[in-house]
Image (cartoon, rainbow, N blue to C red):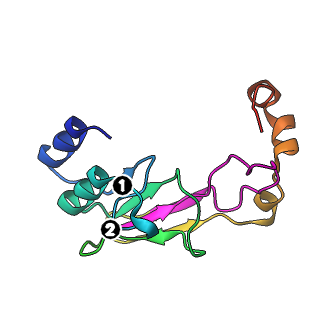
Amino acid sequence: MSQTAVENLITSPGRFDLLLTHDAPFEAYPDLRGSPLIRDVIKECQPVFHIFGHVHVAEGRHEFNVPGTPTRSWLLENVTFGKNLARSLAGSMAILEWDGKEGDITLVKDAWLSQMRFHIWMSVWPEKISNAKP
């Protein structure tokens, strides 16, 4: 996220409910990883939900927050299947329920998604996966 994008978000009229980013916000994810710019947007705009990826589940948690903000940040599991291509896709999708006032995010960890592995994914999209490198 560039400084210009951050300034545009912070200075634009109105607020937004959902922020999607590649990286975690700084100060929310353990080990002080993440982006200070994403943290700044969350502190200033306080979206209800923030969904991000890039990092791995830490301490068994998927939900984080920037201290002092009400924003709930959710980490979705990556879809790289791990170095041995054996990880599942459980936790890589979420269902967002939002009525404009109240809402929740539920991670999808159903059995069908837990069974998805690299070799199964290859049969779904062989042209996209054939060039993938483990």
Dominant secondary structure of the residues highlighted in magenta in the image:
loop
**Between marks 1 and 2 in the image, the one whose residue lies nearer the viewer:** 2
Residue type at mark 2? Thr
Closer to the camera in the image, 130 or 50: 130
Q: Helix, strand or loop at disc 1?
A: strand
For the point 44% across and 67% down, the residue is 31
> Residue 89, position in %: x, y?
72, 55
Q: Is residue 77 left or right of residue 5?
A: right
For the point 54% across and 69% down, the residue is 62
Quadrant where the image shows the N terminus:
top left
Give me the C-alpha separation between circle 1 and circle 2: 9 Å
Picture layout, residue 62 above or below residue 95? below
The range drawn in magenta is 71-97
Picture layout, residue 100 above or below residue 126? below
Picture layout, residue 130 above or below residue 49? above
Outermost residue, front direction?
31
Q: Is residue 131 visible?
A: yes
> Residue 74, position in %: x, y?
47, 64
The residue where tag 2 is placed is 71
Residue type at mark 1? Leu
Q: Is residue 9 left or right of residue 52?
A: left
The residue where tag 1 is placed is 18
Q: Is residue 127 left or right of residue 44?
A: right
* In magenta segment, residue 22: no
Picture layout, residue 2 above or below residue 59? above
Quadrant of the rendered structure where residue 88 is? bottom right
